[in-house]
Image (tube, coloured by chain):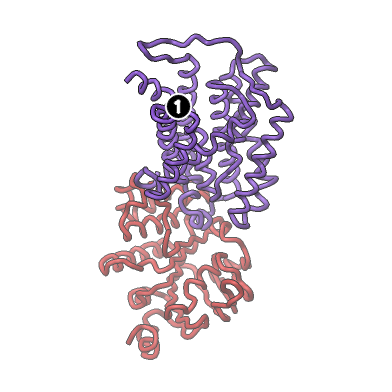
Chain colours: A purple, B red
C-alpha cells in the first residue's frame, strides 16, 4: 500500500512536468496542426538556460526559472520566424520533419555549449522528509507548486485574455478565425512564446528533480505526445489530465515491470488511445 | 455608390471557373438574395467577394474602393461580415466568447455591441455561458450571425442561413434577418429556401452555371413564371 502511495507521489510529480510540456505541445498542434518534435529539446535548452543563470548569478533555481522561460520563449519565436514560418503553407509533414531537424540542432548546440555530461543545479544531498513510510523531498513540493501555478496562469490566459481566447478560437476553427479577422501571425507568435516558456519550465523542474543532460527532453517527448493524445489533441485542459495520468501510469507500472520500460508504458497508452478513443478521454471539447 | 459591386467575375478553384462573368451589387440598406440550382456558383460568388476564392478576372468594389484580390482576413476591418454555411461557430468557446471574438478585428465598445446583438437574439443572452458546440442548429445559426454583427458591419453576407432548420425556425431566421437589415446593414444572402428569402428581398439574382440569368425585385422574381418553373420548382 505504502509502495503504491509512494509511486503515486512520484507519478504526480512526473505528471506535472509532463503536463507542462504537453500543454505547450498541444497548443502548438491546435494552432499549427503539426506535432512539434523539437518540444523536448526546448525543455532541455530551457533547463540549461536556467543552469547558466544559476551559476553566473548564483541564484536559486526557482529564481532562474522565469528567466529561462523568457529566454526559451524568445528562442521558440525566433526559430518559428526563421525556420517554420517559411514552410507553414506547404504540407504539415514538412513542418514535422523540419522540427525533427530543429531538435537535432538544438541538442547539438547544448552539447557544444554546456557539454554532454550530467550536471545538477545544486550539489549536495537534500534530506527528504519522512511521513510515515513515505518520503518526500522539499524540492518535490516546489516542483509541484510551480507546475500548479503555471497551469493556473495558462488557464487564466486562455479564458481571460483576448489573445488567449483567439488562440482557442484558432485551434477550434481555423477558417472561421480567418473570416473573423483574427490575426493568425500574432496568435502563432504567442503560441510559440507560451509553448516555449512552458517547455522551459518543464525542463527546469525536471532538472531540479533529477539532473541535466542533453537528451533529458528528447526522452520525455514520447510521454508528452502520449499525454497530448490521451487528453485530446489541441486541448490544453486535456493535456494536463493526460500528463498526470501518463505520469502516474509510468510510475505505477514499475510495480509489475522493470523501470526501464516506463516509456513503453506511455507508448502503449498512446497506441491504445489512438485505437480506442482517438478524440481523447475528455468529453466535450475543452 | 453601391455598398458592394462585382463586375465580370471569373473565379473558381484550381483553375476551373465556377463563376463566368457574374455581376452583382448590393446597395446600402438592401437585402439581396442569390438563388439558383445546385452548382450555380451562388456560394462561390459570395466567397469570391469576401476574398476566399481567387478571382481570375473581374473587379470587386466596396464603397467605391477596389477590393479585388484582398485577403479575407482584412474584410472584417472594412465592415464586411461573412457567415459560412457550416462550421460557423467556435464550438469549444462559450456563446459570449464567440461574440467577443467576433469583435476582435474592430475593438472598442463591446458592451453596446453585445446589447445590440442580444436585442436581436435574446436567447443568446440566456445561453451566453454555454459552449456554442453544444447548441442546436438554430441556436448555432444565431451565434454565427451574432458573431458577425459584432464588428458593426455595413454588409452582412449569409451563406444559406436557413439550411437544415425546421420550418418554424426558417420563418424566425428570415424575420431576424429583416431586423438586422432594419439597423441599416446591407444583407447579401444565398438561399435554398428561395421563396421565403425572395419574399423579403429588395432584389434577387438568379444564377445558373455561373452566369446571371434574371435580376429583379424579390417579389417580381417570385411572380415570374419562367423563374418559378425553372428555379423554384414550379
For residue B135, above or below residue A153: below
Location of residue B178 (image quadrant)? bottom left
**What residue appears at the point 55 percent right and 46 percent down from the top-left corner?**
A35
**What residue appears at the point 62 percent right and 63 percent down from the top-left corner?**
B70
For residue B222, above or below residue A26: below
Location of residue B143 (image quadrant)? bottom left
Q: In this view, which residue lies farthest toward the bottom?
A: B226
Q: Is residue B103 rendered to the left or right of residue B16?
A: left
Q: Is residue B94 rendered to the left or right of residue A70?
A: left
A84 or A188, which lies in front? Answer: A84
Tell me residue A14's x, y (percent).
47, 28
A36 or A11, which lies in front? Answer: A11
Tell me residue A91's x, y (percent).
60, 57
Secondary element type, mark 1: helix
Residue labelled with disc 1: A148
Tell me residue A33's x, y (percent).
54, 50
Q: Quadrant of the N terminus of chain A?
A: top left
**What residue appears at the point 62 percent right and 35 percent down from the top-left corner?**
A41
Determine if residue B65 is in view. no
Which chain's residue wears label 1?
A
Which class describes the residues within 10 Å of circle 1: few (<14), some (14-19), or many (20+)? some
Q: Is residue B183 rendered to the left or right of residue B77?
A: left
For residue B70, above or below residue A206: below
Tell me residue B195's x, y (percent).
34, 78
B97 or B182, which lies in front? Answer: B97
B166 or A110, which lies in front? Answer: A110
Determine if residue B38 is in view. yes
Amino acid at each position: 500500500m505504502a509502495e503504491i502511495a509512494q509511486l503515486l507521489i512520484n507519478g504526480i510529480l512526473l505528471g506535472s512536468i509532463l503536463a507542462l510540456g504537453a500543454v505547450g505541445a498541444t497548443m502548438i498542434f491546435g494552432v499549427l496542426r503539426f506535432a512539434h518534435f523539437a518540444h523536448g529539446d526546448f525543455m532541455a535548452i530551457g533547463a540549461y538556460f536556467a543552469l547558466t543563470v544559476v551559476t553566473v548569478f548564483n541564484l536559486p533555481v526557482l529564481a532562474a526559472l522565469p528567466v529561462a522561460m523568457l529566454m526559451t520563449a524568445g528562442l521558440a519565436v525566433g526559430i518559428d520566424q526563421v525556420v517554420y514560418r517559411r514552410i507553414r503553407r506547404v504540407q504539415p509533414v514538412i513542418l514535422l520533419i523540419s522540427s525533427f531537424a530543429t531538435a537535432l540542432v538544438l541538442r547539438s548546440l547544448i552539447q557544444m555549449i554546456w557539454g554532454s555530461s550530467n550536471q545538477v543545479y545544486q550539489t549536495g544531498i537534500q534530506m527528504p522528509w519522512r511521513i510515515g513510510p513515505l518520503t518526500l523531498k522539499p524540492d518535490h513540493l516546489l516542483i509541484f507548486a510551480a507546475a500548479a501555478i503555471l497551469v493556473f496562469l495558462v488557464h487564466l490566459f486562455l479564458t481571460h485574455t483576448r489573445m488567449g481566447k483567439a488562440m482557442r478560437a484558432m485551434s477550434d476553427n481555423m477558417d472561421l478565425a480567418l473570416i473573423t479577422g483574427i490575426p493568425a501571425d500574432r496568435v502563432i507568435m504567442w503560441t510559440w512564446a507560451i509553448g516555449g516558456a512552458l517547455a522551459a519550465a518543464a525542463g527546469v523542474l525536471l532538472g531540479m528533480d533529477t539532473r541535466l543532460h542533453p537528451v533529458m527532453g528528447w526522452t520525455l517527448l514520447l510521454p508528452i505526445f502520449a499525454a497530448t493524445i490521451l487528453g485530446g489533441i489541441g486541448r490544453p485542459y486535456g493535456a494536463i489530465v493526460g500528463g498526470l495520468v501518463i505520469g502516474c501510469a509510468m510510475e505505477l507500472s514499475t510495480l509489475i515491470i522493470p523501470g526501464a520500460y516506463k516509456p513503453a508504458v506511455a507508448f502503449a497508452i498512446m497506441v491504445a488511445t489512438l485505437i480506442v478513443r482517438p478524440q481523447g478521454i475528455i468529453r466535450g471539447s475543452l | 455608390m453601391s455598398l458592394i459591386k462585382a463586375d465580370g467575375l471569373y473565379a473558381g478553384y484550381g483553375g476551373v471557373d465556377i463563376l463566368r462573368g457574374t455581376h452583382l451589387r448590393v446597395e446600402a440598406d438592401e437585402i439581396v438574395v442569390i438563388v439558383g440550382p445546385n452548382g450555380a456558383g451562388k456560394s462561390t460568388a459570395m466567397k469570391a467577394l469576401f476574398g476566399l476564392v481567387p478571382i481570375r478576372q473581374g473587379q470587386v468594389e466596396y464603397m467605391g474602393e477596389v477590393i479585388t484580390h484582398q485577403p479575407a482576413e482584412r474584410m472584417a476591418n472594412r465592415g464586411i461580415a461573412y457567415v459560412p454555411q457550416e462550421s460557423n461557430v467556435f464550438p469549444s468557446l462559450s456563446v459570449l466568447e464567440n461574440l467577443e471574438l467576433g469583435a476582435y478585428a474592430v475593438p472598442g465598445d463591446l458592451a453596446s455591441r453585445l446589447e445590440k446583438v442580444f436585442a436581436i437574439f435574446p436567447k443568446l443572452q440566456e445561453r451566453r455561458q454555454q459552449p456554442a458546440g453544444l447548441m442546436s442548429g438554430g441556436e448555432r445559426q444565431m451565434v454565427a450571425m451574432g458573431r458577425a454583427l459584432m464588428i458593426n458591419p455595413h454588409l452582412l453576407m449569409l451563406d444559406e442561413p436557413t439550411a437544415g432548420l425546421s420550418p418554424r425556425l426558417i420563418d424566425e431566421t428570415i424575420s431576424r434577418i429583416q431586423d438586422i437589415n432594419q439597423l441599416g446593414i446591407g444583407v447579401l444572402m444565398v438561399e435554398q429556401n428561395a421563396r421565403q428569402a425572395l419574399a423579403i428581398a429588395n432584389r434577387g439574382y438568379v444564377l445558373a452555371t455561373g452566369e446571371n440569368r434574371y435580376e429583379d425585385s424579390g417579389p417580381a422574381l417570385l411572380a415570374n413564371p419562367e423563374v418559378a418553373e425553372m428555379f423554384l420548382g414550379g
